[in-house]
Image (cartoon, helix red, strand yellow):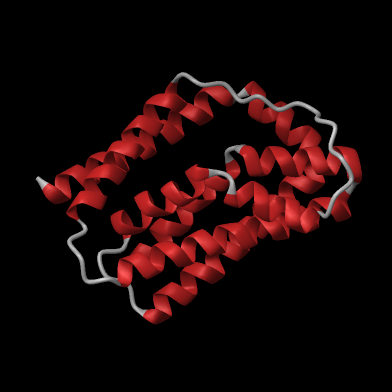
Amino acid sequence: MNQILSYAIVFSIAVFIPGPGILALISYVVNQGKRSGFLLLCGLIVGDLFYLSIVFLGLNQQINMDWLTVISGGYLIWFAYQLWGSCLVIEEQVIKKSNPLLQGTMVSLSNPKTMVFYLAILPTIFTDIDLQSKFLVYIITIIIFLGIGTLYIYSFKFLTVSLIKHQKIILRAVACVMAFLGLHNFCQIF
């Protein structure tokens, strides 16, 4: 159960930091309203669940995961380094009328960081995962994404101003967490 809680915390942090998906969500809400925002959010979830499923399939294989652990640890440390000096950029975008559900799915699937995130986090947190735990991870992923996405949809003006105001603290705290997870990966191997 500690592994599930660890996943929930790390995933919550990852979803809360505006990336391409959250930025697209905010843009849809600004330009097309909350209904389109919720449809886009559902599309983002579909894309994430697809990548999550692929990673779970890979974790089921009886292969040596040492190389994946080292690569994912390196990615997390690199990501932490990038976060340490980065800035959040949230701007209004003009979005053509399109199917928000499909757009959300495509935004998620076209973001390589989504799959790399799951590749980096799941082997770090779960050394062995059974079917019941996988089901819980799916449910937690959906609930967290819906919760944080809904938070952005209903309070995007306040949240975006607040995030920009405190971005350095937020990004550096997340960078520390990611660096710790990356070092944890290396310690498992060496």
Q: Quadrant of the N terminus?
A: bottom left
- Residue visible at 24% across and 50% down in the picture: 69
Q: Is 55 rendered above or below residue 113? A: below
What residue is shown at x 60% (from left), y 58% (from top)?
47
Instruction: Report whether residue 147 is seen.
Output: no
Taking the image as shown, residue 94 lies to the left or right of residue 164, namely: right
Quadrant in the rendering for residue 152: top right
Residue, far bottom: 132
Give the percent coordinates (x, y) of residue 26: 76, 40
Residue shown at 38% from the left, 70% from the top: 57
Q: Quadrant of residue 190?
A: top left
Where residue 68 sits in the image (x, y, percent)?
Answer: 26, 51
* Above or below: residue 95 compared with residue 35: above
Residue 28 at what x, y percent from top left?
82, 43
Q: How many marks?
A: 0
Residue at figure coordinates x 58%, y 52% from the top left: 109
Q: Is residue 139 left or right of residue 31?
A: left
How far from the left and from the top, in percent, is residue 147?
Answer: 67, 57
Q: Is residue 15 depicted above or below 62 in this figure?
A: above
Between residues 183 and 105, which one lies in front from this camera angle?
105
Can residue 126 be seen by looking at this rendering?
yes
Q: Nearer the viewer, residue 123 or 54?
A: 54
Residue 165, by quadrant, is top right
